[in-house]
Image (cartoon, helix red, strand yellow):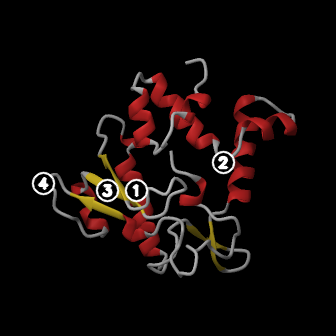
Amino acid sequence: GFRLSEWAQTRKYSYERVTNTNDSRAMINSDWLFYDQNGHIIDKTPSKSSRVFRVDICWRFQKNKQNGEVISFWRDNVEPRFCPVRAAWRISLRALRLGIPAQQPIGQFFDHTRRCMAFMNAPECESYMRAVAKLTTGITDDTTINALFGMHSIRVTACNELARLGVTDSFIQRRLRWRSMTFLDYLRNN
């Protein structure tokens, strides 16, 4: 349910900053704090991975202006492949391994063509998402794919999956950080 601006950039080799600062608009590694089962902060080192129980994510800058909001996610031992804590841990350690500067977005990768770090960016991610959608849905028409699949599809899907699971509208609104009930416009025939 992350917004595009919270993890991706509009350009590949530069990142969006908060007005008049060097601060990244997207998430940085210090926005994620990891805790063990007793509520103690865990250092971001590979040897501590088995102790990670919870991650608190701080949204420093949000479209809805609720800056500084913190949401906790707990370890999922029933479906470890879909565990948000494990995913956040891997992303955080990867950022450290790649030597991403503390003030820069953690959504980076090594561009082998130009032999430098590059930022996850909306145009490339959207192109990839649409290619996957073509392969998995059987829809081959570009106009239809472009109309149905974009970067906002991630939030729409999160909204629909939560509704399909039977969670309340107020939970969806709070968890996906909507200030109004406009998310109801995205609900499909569940």
Residue at the (48%, 65%) spot, across then down: 27
The 10 Å Cα crowd at callout 3, few under 14, some 14 to 19, many 20 or more, is some
Q: Where 178 sits versus 70, above or below?
A: above
Q: Which residue was labeled with disc 4?
A: 38
- Where residue 161 appears, as percent x and y from the top left, is 50, 30
- Where residue 151 appears, as percent x and y from the top left, is 66, 48
The 10 Å Cα crowd at callout 4, few under 14, some 14 to 19, many 20 or more, is few
Q: Amino acid at mark 2?
A: Met
Question: For residue 5, what is the image quadrant?
Answer: bottom right
**Secondary element type, mark 4:** loop
Task: Give the CA distance from mark 1 to mark 2.
Answer: 20 Å
Q: Earlier in the sequence, mark 1 or mark 2?
A: 1
Q: Earlier in the sequence, mark 4 or mark 3?
A: 4
Q: Which residue was labeled with disc 2?
A: 151
Task: Give the CA distance from mark 2 to mark 3.
Answer: 24 Å
Foreground: disc 4 or disc 2: 2
In screen coordinates, is 73 left or right of 149?
left
Task: Give the CA distance from mark 1 to mark 4.
Answer: 19 Å
Q: Which residue was labeled with disc 1?
A: 88
Name the foreground residue: 68 vs 98. 68
In screen coordinates, is 133 left or right of 162?
right
Task: Give the CA distance from mark 1 to mark 3.
Answer: 10 Å
